[in-house]
Image: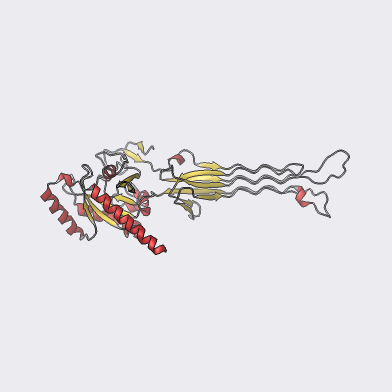
């Protein structure tokens, strides 16, 4: 996926990056259903048969446009180049009471997890959360009536017929939200990409500069031989993200579907002026600004890069962080780089997801 486009200036106002971000998790497309075919104006013409009467057939219906959730897709990248989609129109009717062929429906495949909005009205048309879901988004036009339809006892030779109606046209906003059990959030360079690499088979792009991750990465974390969960590496957030700063609100939206948030914090930042507690508070504020529901999701604190501190220093730094945050939730210490603590974290996540699933099952009975 082409997530980067070279530019001459840093879009975040700093020097050195020089990249403009292109997002493919949102796309606007236009869909046009097929027009209905016109009804025919025709009369039976055969030798030795006078006044054969009307024999104009009806027009065929136009094809409709459907969106279909496909589990093999995980981005909206295909819609960057092609944005207009049109279904086949119906054919016109003809003599001998022949009905025109109806246009074929058009199916457009989108990733599971795609929300579809009408651009002009803002209406949420559908939310395709499961593979195989199919939703009509533009109705095909109806075929017109041939003059045979208007024959009556008082009008034996009607010259009336109707034209087919136009197919429905809509402008749609496709918005992909990651379908994952667990979402990683934290400041740029907190180590999210490294952690998902350590815990799963995902291979996100990793480098020593901010905003390495430009689109969410999904990784399947296996716990034992039969259990697994999906983890989403969400791009780094910065203060002001809820208003569009940095990578903006595009990726806050991805967190909405996750059941559990892991808040990753760098316990040993390279910049001595950075306070880990301040970074945690900053992101918590962005979650609250964006969505109260998102801010109230279960959130665990994951202290990363513990391998960079001696054991005594690690304990002091952890204690100071928890006191500054007044944190009373679950806390885990890991080193994404070495893998230390990741197995314990994975097991705890699996147990929590199982507990939540059991609780939901009991409530539905």
Quadrant location, the N terminus: top left
Q: Is residue 235 visible in the rendered structure shown here? A: no
Quadrant in the rendering for residue 8:
top left
Q: Residue furthest front?
A: 225
- Let me know if residue 15 appears in the view: yes
Residue 76 on image: x %, y %:
43, 43
**Viewer-side residue, 193 vs 119:** 193
Q: Find residue 154 and report its horizontal and vertical position in percent.
A: 84, 55
Relative placement, left or right, of 100 versus 328 is: right
Question: What residue appears at the point 56 percent right and 43 percent down from the top-left corner?
Answer: 106
Could you tell whether 212 is left or right of 317 in the image?
right
Q: Nearer the viewer, residue 358 or 245?
A: 358
Judge whether 182 appears above or below 360 on screen: above
Q: Is residue 94 left or right of residue 52?
A: left
In which quadrant of the rendered image does the C terminus lie? bottom left
Residue 169 image position (x, y, % from top left):
56, 48
- Quarter of the rendering containing residue 193: top left
Picture layout, residue 304 above or below residue 6: below
In the image shown, does 320 or 279 lie closer to the viewer? 320
Would residue 142 be found to the left or right of residue 199 on screen? right
Q: How is the image coloured?
A: secondary structure
Q: Position of residue 11 (x, y in %)?
A: 32, 42
Q: Is residue 133 above or below residue 298?
A: above
Q: How many marks?
A: 0
Q: Residue furthest left?
A: 312
Query: Which residue does the image show at 18% across and 47% down from the upper left?
Result: 306
């Amino acid at each position: 996926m082409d997530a980067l486009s070279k530019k001459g200036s840093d879009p975040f106002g700093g020097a050195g990056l020089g990249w403009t971000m292109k997002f493919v998790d949102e796309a606007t497309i236009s869909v046009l259903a097929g027009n209905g075919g016109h009804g025919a104006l025709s009369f039976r013409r055969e030798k030795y048969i006078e006044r054969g009467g009307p024999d104009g057939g009806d027009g065929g219906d136009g094809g409709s446009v459907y969106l279909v959730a496909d589990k093999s897709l995980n981005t909206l990248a295909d819609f960057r180049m092609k944005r207009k989609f049109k279904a086949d129109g119906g054919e016109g009717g003809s003599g001998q009471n022949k009905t025109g062929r109806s246009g074929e429906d058009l199916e457009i495949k989108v990733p599971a997890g795609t929300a579809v909005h009408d651009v002009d009205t803002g209406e949420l048309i559908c939310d395709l959360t499961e593979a195989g879901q199919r939703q009509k988004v533009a109705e095909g036009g109806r075929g017109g009536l041939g003059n045979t339809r208007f024959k009556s006892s008082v009008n034996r030779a009607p010259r009336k017929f109707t034209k087919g109606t136009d197919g429905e046209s809509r402008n749609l906003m496709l918005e992909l939200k990651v379908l994952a059990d667990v979402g990683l959030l934290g400041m740029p360079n907190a180590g999210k990409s490294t952690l998902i690499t350590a815990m799963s088979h995902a291979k996100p792009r990793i480098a020593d500069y901010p905003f390495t991750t430009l689109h969410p990465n999904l990784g399947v974390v296996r716990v034992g031989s039969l259990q697994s969960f999906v983890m989403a590496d969400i791009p780094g957030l910065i203060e002001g993200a809820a208003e569009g700063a940095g990578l903006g609100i595009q990726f806050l939206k991805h967190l909405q579907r996750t059941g559990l948030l892991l808040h990753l914090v760098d316990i040993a930042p390279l910049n001595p002026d950075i306070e880990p507690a301040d970074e945690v508070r900053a992101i918590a504020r962005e979650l609250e600004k964006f969505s109260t529901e998102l801010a109230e999701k279960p959130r665990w604190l994951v202290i990363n890069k513990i391998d960079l501190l001696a054991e005594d220093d690690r304990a002091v730094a952890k204690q100071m962080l928890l006191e500054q945050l007044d944190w009373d939730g679950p806390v885990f210490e890991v080193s994404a780089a070495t893998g230390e603590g990741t197995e314990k974290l994975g097991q705890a996540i699996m147990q929590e997801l199982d507990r939540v699933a059991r609780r939901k099952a009991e409530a539905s009975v």
